Image (cartoon, grey):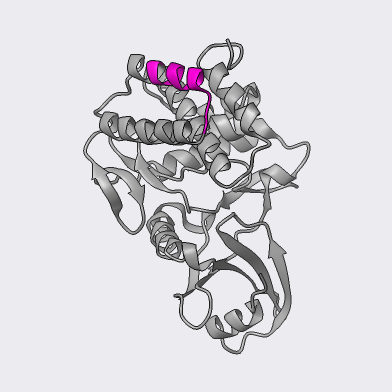
Amino acid sequence: MDHDVAGMVRVALPGWEIAEVLSRSGGQLSAVFEVRGADGGVVIVKVYDPEWAWKQGKEVHVYGVLKPELGELVPSVVHVEPEGERFAFTVLSKVDGVPLSEVDGADYRRIYEQAGELLRRIHRIPQPAYGYLTDRVLEPVATNALYMARQFAKKLREFEELGGDAGLHQRITAYVAEHPVPADVTPVLCHNDFHEGNLLVDPETWRLNGIIDVENAIAADPLLDLAKAQYYSIKDDRAKLDGLLAGYGELPADWEQRTTTYRLYHALELWDWFTVIGMTDPLDSIAHDLAEILGTRSVAG
């Protein structure tokens, strides 16, 4: 869909002379553009499809919460235009750098140590309860155990309704029952999409310049964030994991078991989401991941 991005910038920044508008990789819920000014300035314009315009308030809120802790490591909100005669859009400052997912030959140990430090700083921000974040915690839950029980029940129900393997469903259900997560964890702000596509680096120095995309932010156990980084980006790469853990610092004694359970959740959630949006090619691979996390060789095994 075509967007009058130049017109949006003129609304947000009257008198700003535009030199170039470039389309950037966005999510499935919004379009993202980089707009360069004649004076050398650069801003990011995020345009929301009408169905997802409510996400705008969430992002503005979460960036506002992150800013005092992270400073220039996250974008500043320049302008917010709610849905009206045009699409809802937000203008953000640009964090310099290239997504880590787009570079080759990176010094992963060094970058992931910085990423661990960054994640620890995000997790310094407490939340009043567990749950999905907008500008508040929706359907708040009092304990981590109750929150994860609710989330697993929801995703397992979806998995079954979407035609997921019945044997795998049964094994996940049994695993969750046999490996309860602790109830008494302090809920914190979790980025909940802490992967290489959202980490911006300087490919000359391998400095981590910042993080973007807070659409999935939640209030939860901080280890849920570590587990998503493990599942989405780290996999079996020891240098990445060692770097992340070194940068993050001290972890609870049960961190390995807890993050295993959380990786299972993230894989289950991803399988459900890809099925819903019709992205079927990765489903077998994700099912294999689920089985592997459970300690089996294959879905059939």
User: Farthest residue toward the left?
Assistant: 142
Residue at (46, 66) in percent of width and height: 53
| Residue closer to the observer: 70 or 51 | 51
Q: What secondary structure predominates along the stretch shown in magenta?
A: helix
| Residue closer to the observer: 137 or 38 | 137
Q: In what quadrant of the picture does the C terminus appear?
A: top right
Residue 143, horizontal then vertical, whole percent: 24, 34
Residue at (49, 17) in percent of width and height: 167
| Residue 147 appears in the figure | yes
Q: Is 197 situated left or right of 226 in this image?
A: right
Residue 155, horizontal then vertical, whole percent: 42, 35
* Residue 297 lies within the magenta run: no
Residue 299, horizontal then vertical, whole percent: 58, 17
Q: How many marks?
A: 0
| Residue closer to the observer: 43 or 274 | 274
Residue at (60, 59) in percent of width and height: 95
Q: Is residue 242 above or below residue 132?
A: above
| Quarter residue 175 falls in | top left
Residue at (58, 29) in percent of width and height: 243
Give the extent of the magenta segment.
163-174
* Residue 168 lies within the magenta run: yes
Q: Is 85 situated left or right of 37 in this image?
A: left
| Residue 256 appears in the figure | no
Residue 224, horizontal then vertical, whole percent: 42, 33
User: Farthest residue toward the right?
Assistant: 104
